[in-house]
Amino acid sequence: MSGSGLAADRVARRLGGELVLDGVSLTPAEGSTVGVLGPNGSGKSTLLRVLAGVLAPSAGVVTVDGREIGDVGRRTLARRVAVVEQHADTQIPLTVRDVVGLGRVPHRRAWLAASADDEAAVAQALEQTGMTAKAGQRWQTLSGGERQRVQIARALAQRPRELLLDEPTNHLDVQHQFELLDLLTSLPVTSVVALHDLNLAAMYCDDIVVLDRGVVVAAGRPADVLTESLIMQVYNVKADVTTSPEGHPHVRFIRS
Ligand SMILES: Nc1ncnc2c1ncn2[C@@H]1O[C@H](COP(=O)(O)OP(=O)(O)OP(=O)(O)O)[C@@H](O)[C@H]1O
């Protein structure tokens, strides 16, 4: 398969005897934000882990600039693909600045101290995520939302071309959800983001992929994908979908 960027072609993955992903293809346009939606257990995290090269596909291929991901060196991959997982934790007493600095590791030779470039990338990432004032604070003492923002800062400090995020808005208050997604969509990176909030996905994603039991059941522009029938089919919930004044689909759930 040719093409630039990160792509999945008919990827399957088996876990514990179950087919958790089945024939999933994803070709994010360069610089776009792609939302991965789907119910609990539908395979969103697994897809992100396969795209990150952490899990190998059981069938199909993931490619980076047309090369199979397994053939791209770990260091090369770590320099361009950044991952923000759902439950990052550490027992090591690190400051916020230390954690963000971990994003620079793939760019450094082990025996060299942080360069001016590294320091500038860390400072910029702290600034972009609004964490500069907390740079000296211990990671363990942060709130859930602050930890989330620091993980995102670490990923940004990596200066990736592709950013994979697993429910990054999870712990964030509404202002920080908007700030994060405004930031993601303004960066010159390709982002693949697992989200649960259909309206956030509608507001911010260029494209949406909906998984159900490991299969892509819909993909395309939010307005084409987020329909009342799709929401009923996938989530078994009634919804009223209208168009917001900004032109995005707006989903209102209806209790039956
Ligand atoms: N190591 C494993 N062994 C067996 N099954 C697994 C394993 N890891 C994940 N699964 C199963 O794979 C399916 C997909 O999991 P995944 O975490 O990708 O879903 P998800 O869409 O991210 O869910 P959520 O919205 O709850 O985060 C689930 O049914 C899960 O139980």
Image (cartoon, rainbow, N blue to C red):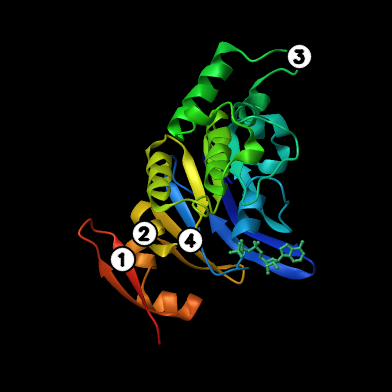
Disc 4 vs disc 3: Cβ atoms closer than 8 Å?
no
Residue 202, labelled with which disc? 2
- Mark 2 secondary-structure assignment: helix
Indicate which label's residue lies in the foreground, 4 or 2: 2
Q: CA distance from mark 3 to mark 2?
A: 45 Å
Q: Position of residue 232 (x, y in %)?
A: 44, 80
User: Which amino acid, by three-letter code, is at mark 1?
Assistant: His
Residue sitting farthest toward the right:
16
Give the residue number, with chain letter if any, for mark 3: 111
Kindly identify the amino acid type of the residue bearing the numbered disc 2.
Ala
SS type, badge 3: loop
The mark that comes first in sequence, 4 or 2, is 2
Side of 221 relative to 83 (left or right): left
- Mark 4, Cα crowd under 10 Å, few <14 / some 14-19 / many 20+, is many
Q: Residue at x 39, y 79 (%)?
A: 229
**Residue that badge 4 annotates:** 209
Upstream in sequence: badge 3 or badge 2: 3
Mark 1 and mark 3: Cα distance apart in space: 52 Å
